[in-house]
Structures are given as structure tokens and as C-alpha cells.
Image: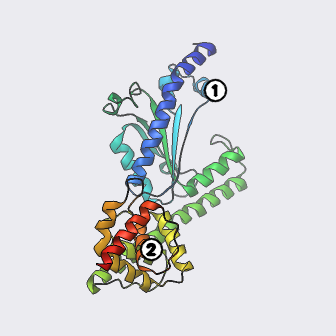
């Protein structure tokens, strides 16, 4: 197969690979959001022809399009180590897995370096009966899952131009390993901080249930999240909205005791609010708390649209009656 014929086949197959890239990337975003897994980015790329041709020539593939497994690649960058396993389980549950590899397993106990989980997938045959995925059953896609710190090390090493088969100066190699070790330790430390924050929230909620009221005293993101989970347990969290809510609370000089009081007053009206919220607006815990502040705090300044004001006034009318 000469270069020109390979190029023609590349052009013919490209639209299907682009469709697979677009649809799988969108599906992964939905899976992460539906499972409340925080992530930095989900990025994707398709090899341009020169990169593709260079690889299949170097590897001497007999069947280039079947043998090359990273024609299309998707990279998921997460914040926490624990979420790597969760995301890999989601991928395994929803796609046909051709191959998996944890790059950390290649490192000796006294070695540090490139870390990432790689999976080669195909689209499940049950998906390929739908218009979005029809004709994509034979396409292989490489998915990489890593934390942001893993990605930082890999990206900088790549930018420096080092390759696995190159023999580096021992001092330079030692320095690279040392940086990798520090980042691996930082990944572990960040995960431990997250565990401690989660445990603090769980303990605060448990103690609040025993007391019959919220017992948190310090105003910070962990206490606010625990408060929202305590009063509005059926609703989803939205970290970004909760952080903005905390900023607004601090700006208004509210205490956690103030917020707890307003949340407690709001509880009887939560279902009433939820029933009126349009499908365009998510009824999250933070959103409900915002409604509480808008309803119960005199002169609370908001930039609410007509639909939101209608809900606020309907609750206020109910309060009057």
C-alpha cells in the first residue's frame, strides 16, 4: 500500500472517526456529570495524516487502520486519584474494552515517571443501531485517564522532547524522577485532604441529625456543603454554584447560623419551588439556598429573571396566608 492510497483511505475514513470522536467525547462528559465526578477537561484529537503515516511506517503495520489504535484519542484529566478508578469502571461498563494498561505498573518500586491509565475501546454494538453511532462499530479509540498533576509531568516531559528510548544524563534523569515523585506525593496528599473534608462533612451531618438542627459553626465551603446536604438531601450538588454562593454569603456578612436559619425556614417550600422551576434551570442545593435568601432576607439584592421572581413571589404569598 503506497502513501497516496493510504492517504485516500485516510480521507474516506476521517468523517467516521470525527463522528466517533465527537459522540464519545460528549458521552464521557455526560457520564462524568451524571456521576458527580469533578474533572478538569475532556479533550480529544484525531491524528493528522503526517503523524498517522509516520507511525504506521515506523511500526511497519501490515493493516494500518486496524493495527493503529490511537488514530482517535480522548484524554480525561481529573483532580483526584480515587476518581481514576471510578472513571475507568464507567468506561468499562459502557464500552467494549479491547485493551487496558496502567502505565504506573511498568515502574519499579524505586522508580518514578509517566503515570496514566490507557484503554483501547470500541463502541458497544448496542449503541451502533442508533443514528449517531451507526457504522462506527469497528473504530478503535484510545482513552487516557490521569490526574492534572500526572498530566503536568507528562506534558512538560513531552515539551522537553525526551523519549523513552533515549539515554539521558543520569543527573538529569534523577531530577526528572524526583519531580515525578514530588507530584505523585502531592496527588496522594490532595486525595487525603479530600477524604478529610468528606469525613468532616459526613460527621457534621450525622451530628446535626442527632441534634435535630445543623450544628456547624465555621463558615467555609465544607460547612456550607454539609449544611446544604443536611437540609436538601434529595438534590444534587453544584460545586461552582456553591462556591459562588459562599462568596455572596461572605459579601453579605452572613454567618453559618444565619444561613442555617434561612435553610430551615425554606424546607417546607422546597417541593413547591422545585415543581415551578423550568427545565432550563437546575434545582440544585445551592440554587434552593439562593431562593431561600431571596425569599427570607429583606432587601437581598438579586438579578432575577421573570420566571424566578414569579417563584419567589408565589412562596412569599403563601407565607402571608
Q: Mark on residue 294? A: 2
Residue 189 at x, y = what percent?
Answer: 52, 68
Q: Is residue 130 left or right of residue 46?
A: left
Which residue corresponds to the image point at 43% horizontal and 63% vertical from the top-left? 308
Decide: is 308 above or below 320: above
Element type at mark 2: helix
Which residue corresponds to the image point at 46% horizontal and 69% vertical from the top-left? 194
| Residue that label 1 marks | 54
Which residue corresponds to the image point at 51% horizontal and 67% vertical from the top-left? 190
For residue 233, say whether it is visible.
no
Residue 85 picture quarter: bottom left
Q: Of callouts 1 and 2, which one flags the residue occurring earlier in the amino acid sequence?
A: 1
Q: Is residue 126 left or right of residue 190?
A: left
Residue 122 at x, y = what percent?
Answer: 40, 33
Residues at marks 1 and 2, CA–CA distance in whole angstroms: 61 Å
Residue 207 at x, y = what percent?
Answer: 31, 83
Which residue corresponds to the image point at 45% horizontal and 61% vertical from the top-left? 306
Label 2 CA crowd tier, 10 Å (few <14, some 14–19, many 20+): many
Q: Is residue 78 left or right of residue 278?
A: right
Colour scheme used in the picture? rainbow
- Where does the N terminus fall, quadrant-wise? top right
Amino acid at each position: 500500500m503506497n502513501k497516496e492510497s493510504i492517504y485516500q483511505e485516510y480521507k474516506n475514513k476521517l468523517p467516521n472517526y470525527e463522528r466517533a470522536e465527537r459522540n464519545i467525547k460528549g458521552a464521557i462528559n455526560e457520564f462524568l456529570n451524571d456521576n458527580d465526578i469533578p474533572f478538569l477537561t475532556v479533550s480529544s484529537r484525531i491524528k493528522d495524516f503526517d503523524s498517522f503515516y509516520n507511525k504506521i511506517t515506523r511500526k511497519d503495520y501490515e493493516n494500518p487502520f486496524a493495527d493503529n489504535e490511537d488514530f482517535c484519542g480522548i484524554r480525561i484529566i481529573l483532580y483526584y486519584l480515587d476518581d481514576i478508578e471510578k472513571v475507568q469502571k464507567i468506561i468499562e461498563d459502557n464500552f467494549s474494552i479491547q485493551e487496558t494498561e496502567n502505565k504506573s505498573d511498568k515502574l519499579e518500586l524505586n522508580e518514578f515517571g509517566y503515570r496514566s491509565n490507557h484503554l483501547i475501546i470500541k463502541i458497544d454494538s448496542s449503541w451502533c443501531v442508533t443514528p449517531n453511532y451507526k457504522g462506527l462499530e469497528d473504530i478503535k479509540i484510545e482513552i487516557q485517564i490521569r490526574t492534572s498533576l500526572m498530566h503536568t509531568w507528562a506534558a512538560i516531559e513531552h515539551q522537553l522532547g525526551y523519549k523513552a528510548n533515549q539515554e539521558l544524563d543520569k543527573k538529569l534523569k534523577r531530577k526528572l524522577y524526583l519531580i515525578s515523585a514530588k507530584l505523585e506525593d502531592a496527588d496522594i496528599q490532595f486525595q487525603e485532604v479530600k477524604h478529610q473534608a468528606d469525613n468532616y462533612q459526613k460527621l457534621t451531618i450525622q451530628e446535626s441529625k442527632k441534634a435535630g438542627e445543623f450544628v456547624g459553626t465555621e463558615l467555609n465551603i465544607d460547612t456550607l456543603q454539609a449544611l446544604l446536604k443536611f437540609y436538601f438531601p434529595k438534590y444534587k450538588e453544584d460545586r461552582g454554584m456553591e462556591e459562588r454562593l459562599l462568596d455572596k454569603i461572605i459579601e453579605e456578612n452572613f454567618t453559618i447560623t444565619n444561613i442555617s436559619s434561612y435553610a430551615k425556614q425554606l424546607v417546607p417550600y422546597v417541593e413547591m419551588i422545585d415543581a415551578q422551576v423550568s427545565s432550563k434551570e437546575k434545582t440544585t442545593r445551592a440554587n434552593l439556598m439562593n431562593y431561600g435568601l431571596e425569599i427570607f432576607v429583606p432587601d437581598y439584592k438579586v438579578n432575577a429573571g421573570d420566571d424566578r421572581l414569579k417563584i419567589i413571589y408565589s412562596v412569599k404569598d403563601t407565607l402571608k396566608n
